[in-house]
Structure formats: structure tokens, C-alpha cells
Image (cartoon, coloured by chain):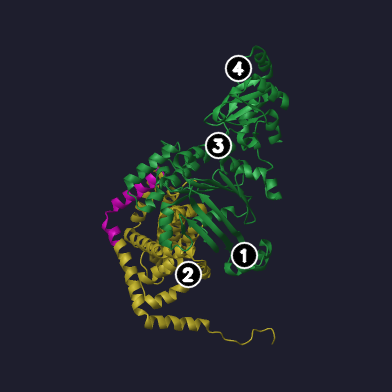
């Protein structure tokens, strides 16, 4: 009998459940506000993207890729976008892109200040480290459940889960980048009588920008990785198409929707990477 | 000259609870013991010194001697644990963040070892930085920056990035940036240590030029004795966070207070530090102009020398008489005036020995040291030059 684990029942999950219930009952107004912000940013983006004529969007992708990379890259990316449209997924693609961009935007608005604060306060950094680790390693499906409990079904819980999953890189890299700004440079700024905010905005942030851009690239890619998962709680877009293809064992749809996501991933990655590249300075 | 900076009993201890460690230091514990017991590092301990207006003050020491910590206490990049830093008659240690900013914007600027240039800004916008922080409008600050860049010889480089410049040029930008706010005090933390020797020499000379023109008070840190002695009006030597000795280069050379200083100054090239006035001696024999050839012969015979200087009123050097000419003149009853020669070497008291060595070794007669009014201050013989360098 000594080989068996003792009969102890630790109901940690139950406490978390109670906590989430308490949140929905008592902090509803906070989550309503949050939901409003999330849905508003999503709707703004998707209405702009759907309002633009299809060829304008293809032209923008072509010009950006050409200018930031090469002419042929622009051509290939334009063809990718055209193909997604040809699969009949134009509107679904715009939904997906809106979810990703809005999630990334919110991640930056929340994440960069947190990263800066971590760089300034060692104690806060120590506190945040394990939380960020947990956010990234926790299986993504797990926080769909509280997201659903807090926000119901639809785009909002999907985006909420996406933000939680995608925000750590930009926080981490902002913190790292600010901490790595040359000590002498900060001392120089200080020695000329700069205020704390002048040091931050005139020296630390510009110096940190290349690394922060890398963080933005990683955050974007992680948001994209959540597309299918987010559709499980009802977020519309290409992810939902993949999910339904899975349920119906529809290889054709699955492939078309899947390759569309791959195309989007390539374009978003290369574009954000080449923007990050532009911000590198030589010493 | 008035006192510009007065440092009184300055102590800087790094660590969680500097006050606790301070008690230990005051009990006479050593630096290493304190580090072991409390984990605190004593950067600077009980340092006091004065710097006069437009003085070039050099702080010298090996790495870890606390010289960088000390200079950072002067503009409060390091907040002193104890002591006072009095600038223009006011203790800056209790300053609030706001007063301190104003003080830094107007009174002091710093030049860094690795330049500390902002790599995301152009040369011009690097130099305007101090004025920008101060709130000077754009047109005016860029005009000032262009002017300062011209004085450091970087005209035409305004739109380049720091990364595109050589080390020497980057440090010129660092200097220009510091000069742009027109501070009365320049803090220079090993500014030339990262440069190669030729460029370093050039920058040293240029800094002396700028100093002569602008009359800034300069606090300069170095670990190089030769650099310290060439630049400094006075040199302070630090060891383990404590001031060992403060004095002019000549004083340090002539009377080193400890073996540490002796060891330090051993490697100096004395010919670049000692000046004519440091090695000259009072001539044992001189003849007044009206003295006549007989007196000249008598003086030379008495001192066993073959030539003697002739001086007129107010010790003005008139010429030199050799024994041969004097004997001849004595026979022919001529006055000294007629037999004096004037093509002998003279030097002013500020000339470095380096420049005198060739003259002193070649000359037939002793070297006469004269001031601006041609007064004879002393003479230098070949022997006195050689013995000074030994």
C-alpha cells in the first residue's frame, strides 16, 4: 500500500473556478469595458479593410513588399493575396487579419509600457518573469475556458486568448532592450540634465526600437498561431473554416484554408521583419 | 583665482545599506574586509580637494582606484554617501531632482571614455542634445552646434552618424556636445584612453588649445602618468578610493609622498614635465656692466670658470664675457661693453627640458634663463640637464 500516492485531494482548480465566477459576478463592468474595447478595435479594422477595394489592398501589399524587400517579393506576395481571394476567402481573410492586427495593437499598447516598467523596477521584473513563462507555456486551449466564461462566445474571447498568448514576447523584449541600452549613453543623457521622460523618449526608446520591433514581429507570429484555436470559441475567419473542414473531414476546404493561413503568415512575418531591419543602427 | 569646486570629506559606498558600511569605514576597517563582511564596495573614502577657476585638474589612478566614481560624484551621477560637493559656493548634494537638472544643464558637462554618443542621432543632433534638453529653440541650438563643431574641426560631418566616424572624430563630437551648452566646468572621464597614441597626442594638444581659449575649469581623469603631467596644472593621485597626494607635476616628481607615488611617477618622461625653471640654478658669478674687465677676470678665476654673464640695471642680461676676451681687454684697457658677445643661447623659464637637451649639449657656454623683461633668472649647464633627467 506504500506505493500508492496518499489519498489527498487538492482542489486548486476549484479555487480558480470560484475565482473566475467571482470575477464574472463582481467585476462584470471591467470585462464589459474590456470587451467593448476589443470588439471596437476589431470592427474598426475590419470595416476599413473591407471598405477598401480588393485591388487597392493587393497594390498596397505589392508596393510595401517591393519597397521593403525586392520587386519579385512584391509580385509573389500580391499573387498569394489574390489566390486567397480566388479560394473565395477574401472576407474571411480580412476577418482573420483584423483579429491579428487588433490583437497585436492591443498587445503593444499594454505590453510596451509593462516592459518599460519592468526595465525600471527590478522587483517588478522578478514578479513578472514567472507569469510570462506561464502565459507562454500553458496549453493555449486552457485559457479559452475562462475567456469564454468571462466574455461568452465570439470574437472577443478569441482575441482575449490571442492577446494573452501573444503579448509575452513584446513585454520581454522591451524590458531586455531598455536594460541593454549602453550605460554610458544613459549617463550622458543624465549628465546633460535630462528628465526621466527625456531619457526614456530621447535615448532609451529610440535605442531599444530595433529590439522592440523584433518583439513585435514575434508577437504577430504568435497571434497568427492562435487563429485556429481562437475559432474554437467562435472567432470568425480562416480558422473557423479549418475547424469546420476538420469536423467534416473535408480535405479540399482544409487545404485551401490552411494554405491561406500559411500565405498570411509568410507575408506578415517578412513584412514585419523587414520593418524591424530598417531600425537597426550601426554603433 | 577663486575656488570653483570644493570637495569636502566625500565618501561613496555602493550597496544596499551604505550608512552601515560607512560606520565600519569610520572605525578604520579596510576596503576588502568591508566587502567581505557586508558586500559593500567602498568607491571613494574621505576625499577632499579644491579646484580653482579655469584650472586643469587631473585625477590619476589605476583602474579600481575610485577615480571614475569620484568624477561621477561631482555631477551626482553617483550620489555621495557622505560629504559635500560645493560648486560656486553651493553644496549640490542636497539638490532636488529639478534643481540638479538645471545645474547639469547650465554648469557642467561630461565627456566619456567610450564617447557615449547617441547612435540613433546624427552628429549635429548629438551636439544639440544638451541645448535641446534645456529647451533652446531649434534654429538657435543648431547654429550653436555648427559653430562648436567647427571649433573641434568637424565641419561638414553634421549629417553623418557616429558609427561612420573614427574613434578620434567620435571623441571630438563628445567634446563638441559638452562644449555646446557652454558649461563652466568640463568633466572628462578618461576621454582619450580609447584612442591610439598618435590621435591621443593630437587631441591632448587640441584640448590645451581649447582650454587656453575658453578658460573652462577641467576635471580630467586618466591612468596615464605622462598624460596627467602634460595636461594638468595640478595632479591628484588616487589609490583604493583614497587621495594619496595632490600637487603640481613638479611637486609630485620632486617630492613623492609615498612609495606608491614613486612607483607611479617612475615611468614618466621627465624631459616633458620639467621646465627650465625647475633645473636652473643661480649663477655663482656675475659681473655688473660697469664692473670692468679686471673684475670679470677676478670672478672667473675665483670660481674656476671660463665665461661670465654681464648684467645691467634690474638684473637685465646684457651679454657674456669669455676669459680670453677679458684678458685682452684688460691689457688694452677697454670697457666690458666692447668685448661682450651676444650670440649665446637663452631660454624662457617655461620651456620644457625636452627642447633644451640639444641646445645644452651643443653650447659652448651655459644656457641663460631669462624672463620677458630680459632679466637673468638663472643658468643651466649641460650637467644640470643631465642630472635632472637621471
Which mark is nearer the camera, 4 or 3?
4
Q: Is mark 4 in CB contact (under 8 Å) with mark 3?
A: no
Image quadrant where residue A269 sits: bottom left
N-term-proximal mark, 1 vs 4: 1
Q: Which portion, as a residue range, is magenta?
A: A46-70
Q: Marks 3 and 1, Cα distance to the nearest angstrom?
A: 39 Å
Residue indicated by mark 3: B199
Disc 4 with disc 3 on a shared chain = yes
Which x, y percent locates residue B54? 48, 45
Which x, y percent locates residue B90? 45, 58
SS for callout 3: helix
Q: Numbered disc 3: what chain?
A: B
Dot 4 surroundings within 10 Å: few (below 14), some, or many (20 or more)?
Answer: some
Q: Marks 3 and 2, Cα distance to the nearest angstrom?
A: 59 Å
Given the current orientation, which residue lies at the most extreme top position?
A: B332
Which x, y percent locates residue A150? 39, 77
Which lettered chain is shown in yellow?
A: A
Residue indicated by mark 2: A140
Q: Is mark 1 in CB contact (under 8 Å) with mark 4?
A: no
Q: Marks 1 and 4, Cα distance to the nearest angstrom?
A: 79 Å
Q: Nearer the viewer, residue A219 or A248?
A: A219
Colour assigned to chain B in the rendering is green
Amino acid at each position: 500500500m506504500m506505493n500508492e500516492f496518499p489519498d489527498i485531494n487538492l482542489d486548486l482548480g476549484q479555487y480558480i473556478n470560484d475565482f473566475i465566477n467571482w470575477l464574472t459576478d463582481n467585476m462584470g463592468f471591467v470585462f464589459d469595458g474590456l470587451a467593448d474595447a476589443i470588439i471596437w478595435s476589431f470592427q474598426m479594422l475590419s470595416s476599413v479593410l473591407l471598405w477598401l477595394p480588393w485591388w487597392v489592398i493587393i497594390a498596397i501589399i505589392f508596393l510595401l513588399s517591393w519597397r521593403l524587400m525586392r520587386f519579385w517579393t512584391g509580385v509573389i506576395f500580391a499573387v498569394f493575396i489574390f489566390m486567397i481571394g480566388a479560394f473565395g476567402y477574401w472576407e474571411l481573410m480580412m476577418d482573420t487579419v483584423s483579429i491579428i492586427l487588433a490583437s497585436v495593437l492591443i498587445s503593444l499598447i499594454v505590453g510596451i509600457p509593462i516592459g518599460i516598467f519592468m526595465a525600471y523596477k527590478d522587483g517588478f521584473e522578478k514578479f513578472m518573469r514567472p507569469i510570462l513563462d506561464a502565459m507562454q507555456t500553458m496549453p493555449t486551449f486552457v485559457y479559452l475556458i475562462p475567456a469564454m466564461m468571462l466574455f461568452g462566445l465570439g470574437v472577443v474571447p478569441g482575441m482575449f486568448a490571442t492577446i494573452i498568448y501573444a503579448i509575452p514576447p513584446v513585454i520581454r523584449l522591451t524590458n531586455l532592450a531598455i536594460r541593454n541600452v549602453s550605460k554610458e549613453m544613459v549617463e550622458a543623457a543624465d549628465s546633460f540634465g535630462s528628465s526621466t521622460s527625456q531619457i526614456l523618449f530621447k535615448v532609451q526608446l529610440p535605442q531599444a526600437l530595433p529590439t522592440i520591433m523584433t518583439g513585435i514581429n514575434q508577437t504577430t507570429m504568435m497571434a497568427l498561431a492562435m487563429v485556429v484555436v481562437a475559432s474554437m470559441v467562435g472567432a470568425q475567419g480562416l480558422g473557423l473554416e479549418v475547424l469546420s473542414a476538420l469536423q467534416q473531414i473535408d480535405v479540399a476546404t482544409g487545404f485551401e484554408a490552411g494554405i491561406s493561413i500559411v500565405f498570411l503568415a509568410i507575408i506578415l512575418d517578412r513584412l514585419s521583419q523587414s520593418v524591424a531591419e530598417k531600425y537597426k543602427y550601426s554603433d | 583665482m577663486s575656488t570653483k569646486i570644493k570637495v569636502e570629506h566625500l565618501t561613496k559606498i555602493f550597496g544596499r545599506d551604505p550608512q552601515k558600511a560607512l560606520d565600519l569605514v569610520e572605525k578604520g576597517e579596510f576596503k576588502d574586509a568591508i566587502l567581505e563582511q557586508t558586500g559593500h564596495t567602498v568607491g571613494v573614502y574621505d576625499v577632499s580637494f579644491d579646484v580653482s577657476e579655469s584650472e586643469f585638474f587631473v585625477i590619476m589612478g589605476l583602474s579600481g582606484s575610485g577615480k571614475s566614481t569620484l568624477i561621477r560624484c561631482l555631477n551626482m551621477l553617483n550620489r555621495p554617501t557622505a560629504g559635500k560637493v560645493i560648486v560656486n559656493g553651493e553644496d549640490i548634494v542636497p539638490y532636488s531632482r529639478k534643481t540638479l537638472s538645471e545645474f547639469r544643464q547650465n554648469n557642467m558637462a561630461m565627456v566619456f571614455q567610450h564617447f557615449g554618443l547617441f547612435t540613433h542621432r546624427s552628429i549635429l543632433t548629438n551636439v544639440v542634445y544638451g541645448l535641446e534638453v534645456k529647451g533652446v529653440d531649434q534654429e538657435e541650438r543648431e547654429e550653436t552646434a555648427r559653430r562648436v563643431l567647427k571649433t573641434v574641426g568637424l565641419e561638414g560631418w553634421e549629417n553623418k552618424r557616429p558609427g561612420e566616424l573614427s574613434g578620434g572624430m567620435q571623441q571630438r563630437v563628445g567634446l563638441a556636445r559638452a562644449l555646446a551648452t557652454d558649461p563652466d566646468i568640463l568633466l572628462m572621464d578618461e576621454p582619450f584612453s580609447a584612442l591610439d597614441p598618435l590621435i591621443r597626442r593630437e587631441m591632448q594638444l587640441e584640448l590645451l588649445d581649447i582650454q587656453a581659449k575658453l578658460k573652462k575649469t577641467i576635471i580630467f581623469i586618466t591612468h596615464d602618468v605622462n598624460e596627467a603631467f602634460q595636461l594638468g596644472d595640478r595632479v591628484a593621485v588616487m589609490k583604493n578610493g583614497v587621495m594619496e597626494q595632490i600637487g603640481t607635476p613638479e611637486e609630485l616628481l620632486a617630492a613623492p609622498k609615498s612609495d606608491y607615488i614613486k612607483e607611479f611617477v617612475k615611468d614618466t618622461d621627465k624631459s616633458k614635465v620639467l621646465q627650465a625653471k625647475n633645473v636652473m640654478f643661480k649663477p655663482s658669478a656675475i659681473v655688473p656692466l660697469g664692473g670692468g674687465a679686471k673684475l670679470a677676470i677676478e670672478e672667473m678665476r675665483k670660481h674656476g670658470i671660463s665665461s661670465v654673464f654681464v648684467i645691467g640695471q634690474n638684473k637685465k642680461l646684457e651679454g657674456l664675457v669669455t676669459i680670453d676676451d677679458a684678458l685682452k681687454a684688460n691689457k688694452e684697457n677697454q670697457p666690458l661693453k666692447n668685448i661682450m658677445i651676444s650670440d649665446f643661447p637663452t631660454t624662457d623659464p617655461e620651456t620644457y627640458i625636452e627642447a633644451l637637451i640639444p641646445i645644452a649639449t651643443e653650447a659652448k657656454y651655459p644656457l641663460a634663463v631669462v624672463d620677458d623683461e630680459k632679466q637673468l633668472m638663472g643658468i643651466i649647464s649641460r650637467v644640470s640637464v643631465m642630472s635632472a633627467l637621471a
